[in-house]
Image (cartoon, grey):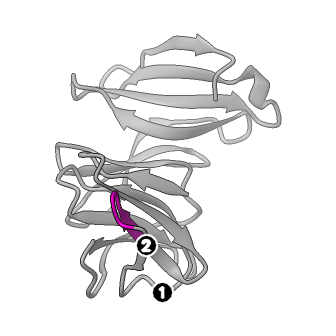
Amino acid sequence: VIDISPDGRDFAYNTDDGLYLRTMGELEPRLISGTEPPSSSLTFSPDGQTIAYLDFQNNLLKRIAISGGAPVVIAEVPDNLYGISWEADGTILFGQFWGILRVSATGGAPELIIDSDEEQERVNAPRLLPDGDSVLFSVSPIGDFDAGQIVAQSISTGERTVILEGGN
């Protein structure tokens, strides 16, 4: 799993040792101190100074400054994340088996904003669109990624619009 900072200057990725950060123009990446438990599903904050990630040993969504330090728990999550994004409005979106959830980057209880039929489909990679109400994500029938779609769905109305067939 890898993510690039909004300004394109840094990229971060996870390893069994923790999260590593590499700044463009530098040869060596560095371990972000405080991220040592295995992690996955990471995203940069809009200002690029903080990373949110899943500590999957403890099922905790955490955030940490790219300079390192003590991670801060944002929320408990019951399962692995299927895509994560830190939005300009200060919320974090992430996919789970049963849908897309939103939580404040400062912490709190995740809120289900887009329901999914966990018996029929999987959702992944949510991103809030500029209207602040629509979420762009991929959805595919279980076991058939080739039949996936890229969709936009309104949080307020639930209306789903297919953007691309065969995308995942």
Picture coordinates of residue 13 (x, y %)? 49, 64
- Which image quadrant is residue 141 in? top right
Binning the other alpha carbons within 10 Å of mark 1 as few (below 14), some (14 to 19) or many (20 upward) gives some
Identify the residue at horizontal 58%, vertical 45% (top origin): 98
Picture coordinates of residue 102 (x, y %)? 34, 49
Picture coordinates of residue 2 (x, y %)? 50, 56
Looking at the rendered structure, the kind of residue marked 2 is Pro
> Is residue 76 something that shows in the picture?
no
Picture coordinates of residue 46 (x, y %)? 21, 49
Identify the residue at horizontal 38%, vertical 55% (top origin): 43
Please state the extent of the stretch shown in magenta in the rendering: 21-26
Which is nearer the N-term, disc 2 or disc 1? Answer: 2
* Residue on which disc 1 sits: 36
Identify the residue at horizontal 25%, vertical 65% (top origin): 50
The image shows residue 150, relative to residue 7, as above or below, that is: above
Of labels 2 and 1, the one closer to you: 2
Binning the other alpha carbons within 10 Å of mark 2 as few (below 14), some (14 to 19) or many (20 upward) gives some
For numbered disc 1, what is the local secondary structure?
loop
- Which image quadrant is residue 157 in? top left
Question: Depth check: 119 or 8 in front?
Answer: 8
Question: Depth check: 152 or 28 in front?
Answer: 28
* Residue on which disc 2 sits: 29
> Is residue 155 something that shows in the picture?
yes
Identify the residue at horizontal 46%, vertical 74% (top origin): 19
For numbered disc 2, what is the local secondary structure?
loop
